[in-house]
Image: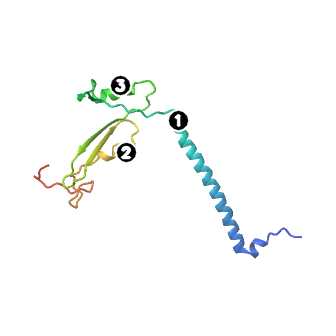
Amino acid sequence: MSLGAGLPFARPARSALTLAAVVLGVTTVTFATGLATTMTLFEDGGKGAYDVTVYAGGYVDGKQVLPVHGDRELQSLLGSLPGAARVTARADEDARLEGSAQRIVFEGRRGPDLPLDDVLVRGALDAPSGRGRGRLGLPAPQRGAHR
C-alpha cells in the first residue's frame, strides 16, 4: 500500500498541466467574483444621487432673459441649497481655429472634484517647445502675425 507521493514525479507533464488548470480555475473564480462585486458597488454608488442641470438665462418670447445674479454668485447660491453635494459651473463657447473648417467648441468647467482639474488650461498655445510647435502640438504663431 502506498500514498502515491511518487506519482507527480513519475508523470511531471501531467502534474504540471493539472497544477496549471487549478491555478487558472482559482484565478478565474477570483476575477469573476471581484468583477461582480465591483460592478454591484459601482451600480449602488449612484443611488439616491441626482444630476440636475440649471440654465442661467434663456429666451422668452424671442427676447433674451439674463440672470439677476453673477456667475459665481449663482454657483454659490446653488451650492448652499439643502442636499446639494457638488455644483459645477459649465460654459460652452464656439471658436475658430485658423486653417481648419471644422467647428470647435470649447467647454469650460469650474467646481470641486472635476475629473481633469486644471490640466487643460496649463501652458499656452504659443509657448515654443523647440520644434516650431507650441505645447499642444499646434504650430507656434509667427511674430507680428495677425491673431
Check whether the beta carbons of the residues at disc 1 and disc 2 lie within 8 A of each other. no
Residue 41: quadrant of the picture: top right
The residue under the point 56% across, 46% down is 38
Residue 130 x, y percent position in the rendering: 22, 60
Q: Does residue 1 appear to the left or right of 71 in the view shown? A: right
Mark whose residue sits in front, 1 or 2: 1
* 122 is higher (above) or lower (below) than 11: above
Residue 19 x, y percent position in the rendering: 69, 66
**Which residue does the numbered mark 3 point to in the structure image?**
77
SS at circle 1: loop
Instruction: Looking at the image, tell me whether mark 1 or mark 2 is earlier in sequence order.
Output: 1
Q: In the rendering, which numbered label is found on residue 47?
A: 1
Farthest right residue? 1
Residue 132: quadrant of the picture: bottom left
Closer to the camera, 91 or 127? 91
Residue 9 x, y percent position in the rendering: 75, 74
- The crowding category of the residue bearing disc 3, from other C-alpha atoms within 10 Å (few below 14, some 14 to 19, many at least 20), is few
Farthest bottom residue? 10
**Which residue does the numbered mark 2 point to in the structure image?**
116
- The crowding category of the residue bearing disc 2, from other C-alpha atoms within 10 Å (few below 14, some 14 to 19, many at least 20), is few
